[in-house]
Amino acid sequence: MAMVTAKLSSPATARLAPVRSAQPARRASLVRVRASGGSYADELVSTAKTVASPGRGILAIDESSATCGKRLASIGLDNTEVNRQAYRQLLLTTAGLGEYISGAILFEETLYQSTTDGKTFVDVLKDQNIMPGIKVDKGLVPLPGSNNESWCQGLDGLASRCAEYYKQGARFAKWRTVVSIPCGPTALAVKEAAWGLARYAAIAQDNGLVPIVEPEILLDGDHGIERTLEVAEKVWSEVFFYLAENNVLFEGILLKPSMVTPGAEHKEKASPEAIAKNTLTMLRRRVPPAVPGIMFLSGGQSELEATMNLNAMNQSANPWHVSFSYARALQNSVLKTWEGQPENIEAAQKALLVRAKANSLAQLGSYTGEGESDEAKKGMFQKGYTY
């Protein structure tokens, strides 16, 4: 019988040699993971739909104590808790506000404050069918290894904070990070922004809060609208990739994007129609229709610009509720009318209703711009603005 000898491979050769099997290759099995939200899923979806209700949007009054102090200083008031409480009471006790406002984003201090009559601000909002929300991030700090860019801190302890905010009556949350076009943006900054937003969103949902996802693309710069569109598409692509990686329930989130505009220092301003076209193009390419609401930030636009641009975006049907989450674009006229004087409170509240109604009409695509004041037309962009 002939002897058959086998040639032994060396260990190195054996490692390199392909292994063939008569069995068909198996695909790697996927572990089934539940979406964030768990037992809160139905409530999250309901909350998001309530905030994204026709003709209504969000009043953002979540400025930190330092930022609120700057607003108060502009009308000659000291930055004290008493003055901050007085201003927030003016805003939140405005009769009829709930007709135009579906949610109010609060700073932690405000969530636990009450009116001078002893009624909690949370109850004031609930009585007007306005959902209380809460800012949960801890602000921006320099991002090491980047091109003078920032990252948002606040993930440490976020779960316990969200649980406490839920007990206090908050039902949605906000986390703001920023992307700077003049600084790149670098791939590192975009990835850090997207990952931080996704981790926050998953944690918020797990504790009963609808997360507002806000990667603000700053207005700073002299770039054209095409560059803003390019960056916005990149940012939102990364954001939704990591939202999915973190099993975030899309039906239980809200977005707070920047509008796609030219840089504030660009030589030519874009029309509301051009801004609407580019912004909706970006959203349709990147945002799933499962997301119930797009609540735009104003980002330093004038009160009038923010309203006109929103109106232009609602001239045709969209797969999401397209609305507003404005701070300065709702408050600027109010502050200047109030001037810290008790006798001006009623007039200041009327000014708030004027702006809220204008943006309500814009959400419905019915805003005309007639009768707007010169104050509403003044731009509010500040280069290098810190929040």
Image (cartoon, helix red, strand yellow):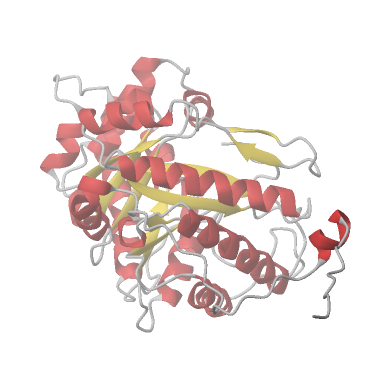
State which quarter of the image contains the C terminus. top right
State which quarter of the image contains the N terminus. bottom right
Residue 222 appears at what percent x and percent y?
77, 61
Q: Nearer the viewer, residue 345 or 135?
A: 135
Is 185 situated above or below 319? above
Residue 335 appears at what percent x and percent y?
41, 37
Residue 94 appears at what percent x and percent y?
21, 41
Residue 81 appears at what percent x and percent y?
38, 16
Left-right relation of 320 to 280: left
Q: Nearer the viewer, residue 131 or 363?
A: 131
Q: Nearer the viewer, residue 77 or 325?
A: 325
Is 207 situated above or below 307? above
Single out the residue that lies furthest toward the bottom. 316
The mark total stands at: 0
Left-right relation of 271 to 126: right
Q: Name the residue: 73% across, 56% down.
A: 181
Single out the residue that lies furthest toward the front. 1
- Confirm whether residue 258 shows in the render: no
Single out the residue that lies furthest toward the left. 127
Q: Name the residue: 34% across, 16% down.
A: 82
Is 316 situated above or below 38? below
Q: Name the residue: 21% across, 22% down.
A: 114
Q: Quadrant of residue 341?
A: top left
- Confirm whether residue 184 shows in the render: yes
